[in-house]
Amino acid sequence: MHAKTVDDVVRAFETIVQQAYDDNSRIGYFAALYLKVTKLVRQKIQEGDYFENNERLEKLDVIFANRYLDALTKYNNGEPITQAWQLAFDACQDGSLTVVQLLLLACDAHIGLDLPVAVAEVSGGQIDDSLHQDFLKLNPLLASLVPKVSDDIDKISPLIGFVDRYFSFLSNGIIDFSMDIARDKAWSNAVWLAGLSGEGFERGVQELDTSVTNFSHTIYHPGCVFSPILWLIHLFETKDVRTVIKELED
C-alpha cells in the first residue's frame, strides 16, 4: 500500500479502517482519527488558498502518510519496522490499555518520528521560511478537530467524559498544548535531520526512533501514580472495538 496523492492517502486509510472494523482490530482507532485529519488537509489543499505551496504540502502529506502505511504493511508481513511503530502496533493487542493510550502511542510514533523525517525529506535539505509557515498552518487545522475528538473520547471513556463535562476547558487545553509541544519538537528535529545526509541521516533517524520509543514506554507504563487512574478509565470505557472505530471516524 503506497500512496502517490492525497486522494490515495484517503482511500488507503478508508481501506485500513474498514479492514480493522471487519477484523475487530484496535489498529483502526488511530487510522480512523488519521482519516479525519487527512480529509481536512485535503480540503484545504483543494481550496488552493490556505497553504503557500500546495504541491509541496501534498507531497509532504503523502510522504508522511506513506511512513505509516509502509510500517503497517511490514508489520502485518512480520518484517522489521521502527521501534516506535513496533511498540504502537503491538500495543493494539494488549487489552489492558485504554483507547487514549493507544492513540497517544500512535501519535508519538507518527508525529515524533515520521513527521520530522517527512519534513526533512520534502525539504531536500533546504529548510526555508515558506515550508515552516505551511507547517505552522497545520496547527489550527488540528486544533479545530480537538473539540470533536474530545467529545468522541468522552463517549468512549465515561470517566474522561465526567472530567470534560466540568472541566472541558482544561482537557481541551491540555490536548492543544500537548499537540503544540509535539509539533514544535518535530519541527526542531526536522531541521536537524535536514542538515544530515547519507549514513548520517539514517543514524539520525535511528537515534530519533530510540528517543521517541523511550517516551512511548512511559505512555505504555505510566508508573504507580497514573496506572490506577488508567485502570479505572479502562474499566468503564467502551470495549466494543467497532463502536470505538465508528465514534472516532464519524
Image (cartoon, rainbow, N blue to C red):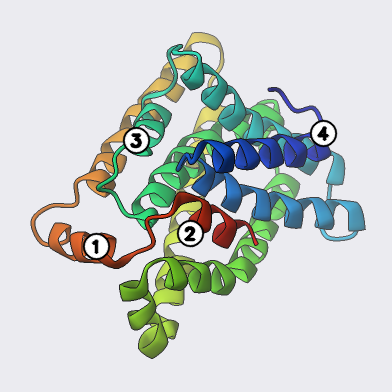
Residue for badge 4:
5
Disc 1 is placed on an element classified as helix
- Name the image quarter holding the N terminus: top right
Q: Is 21 above or below relative to 142?
A: above
Residue plotted at (56% across, 59% down): 248
The amino acid beneath tag 2 is: Met
Residue on which the image places disc 3: 93
Name the residue at 33% across, 81% down. Answer: 163
Q: Residues within 10 Å of mark 4 (few under 14, many from 20)?
A: some
CB under 8 Å between callouts 4 and 1? no
Q: Is residue 121 left or right of residue 200?
A: right
Amino acid on which the number 3 mark rests in the picture: Gln
Counting residues from the start of the chain, the first of labels 4 and 1 encountered is 4
Residue situated in front as seen by the camera: 174 or 94: 94
Evaluate whether residue 191 shows in this view.
no
Residue kind at label 4, given as amino acid type = Thr
- Label 2's element? helix
The residue sitting at 90% across, 52% down in the picture is 46
Residue tagged by mark 1? 235
Q: CA distance from mark 3 to mark 1?
A: 17 Å
Q: Vertical placement of 11 versus 157: above or below?
A: above
Name the side, left or right, on which 9 lies relative to 162: right
Q: Residue 9 at x, y = what percent?
A: 73, 37
The residue that mark 2 highlights is 179
Categorize mark 1 by other alpha carbons within 10 Å: few (<14), some (14-19), many (20+): some
Upstream in sequence: badge 2 or badge 3: 3
